[in-house]
Image: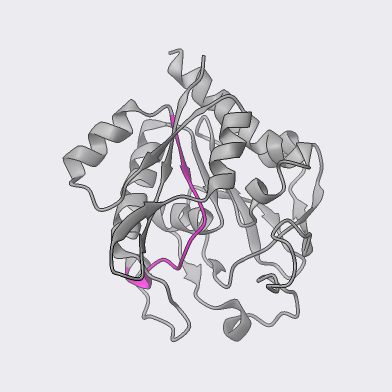
Amino acid sequence: MQPFIGITTGVRFADDGRRYYAVYAPNVIALERAGALPVMIPCGLQPETLRAIYGRMDAVLIPGGGDVDPVHYGADRHPRTERIDPERDATELLIAQWAVEDDLPLFGICRGHQVMNVAMGGTLVQDIPSQVDSDLIHDTPGDLPRGAPIHQVNIQPASRLAAIVGATTVAVNSFHHQSVEQPAPAANVTAFAPDGIVEALERPDRRFVLSVQWHPEDIAGDDEAMQRLFDAFVDAARERARR
């Protein structure tokens, strides 16, 4: 069967002010390739409407995007925290909390990795360049393709992530200036960048709650290991749908 996978969206505005909901297409393609039926979840809906949509989903993907408002983890806003989308924050944090509580498969990418950590009670570094002593590049220069490997990630051998990708070291792309600071209490940190930045989280007590800081959707078309992240996620959704 083809499980329904909800993908949360962000708000975009045209030059004339018209409002749109948007989702990054490579995520949709990677999910379709894994055998899923991708469904966009608009943000800014009434909670009862959002809950009704969520209730039809077999899993949820929270993709990349702008920064999470630090009000959600009890911090003052850093001058370099930007592109805050209050409606998206509210929608994704609520859905992430529901999914963890309900043991609904949940996969977070980049911003989604950070959202999931905050939803479960963790905090974020708001600006790596000014707050972390590191020479490692985490935000890819614009003249490189999005799938270009920027740095390596070291994965805990006993983790679900290592089992999925079949390795304990992978080369990844990178497009972020924020990161996990204090991991959520119930989450396991399962991958680090060489400078110590948290690159993956898991909940071992859940069917599939996993997040990564890089963008596997930009690599999955040419890298079987990255596609297997989507395959494993969709398999977990399919298993839950058969209950």
- Pick the front one: 12 or 237: 12
Q: Residue at x 41, y 66 (%)?
A: 68
Q: As displayed, is residue 31 above or below residue 13?
A: above
Location of residue 164 (image quadrant) = top right
Residue 122, x across and y down, in percent: 45, 60
Q: Can residue 37 be found in the magenta stretch?
A: no
Q: As displayed, is residue 235 above or below residue 226?
A: above
Location of residue 104 (image quadrant) = top left
Residue 196, x across and y down, in percent: 70, 67
- Total labels drawn: 0
Residue 218, x across and y down, in percent: 67, 50
Identity of the residue furthest to the front in this view: 16
Q: Can residue 65 be found in the magenta stretch?
A: yes
| The C terminus lies in quadrant | top left
Residue 105, x across and y down, in percent: 48, 33
In the image: residue 89, left or right of residue 239: left
In the image: residue 148, left or right of residue 77: right
In the image: residue 238, left or right of residue 41: right
- Pick the front one: 189 or 213: 213
**Residue 162 visible in the current orientation:** no
**Residue 91 visible in the current orientation:** yes
In the image: residue 188, left or right of residue 106: right
Q: Residue at x 53, y 27 (%)?
A: 36
Q: Residue at x 78, y 64 (%)?
A: 151
Q: As displayed, is residue 62 above or below residue 143?
A: above
The structure's colour scheme is one colour
Magenta-colored span: 59-71
- Pick the front one: 218 or 114: 218
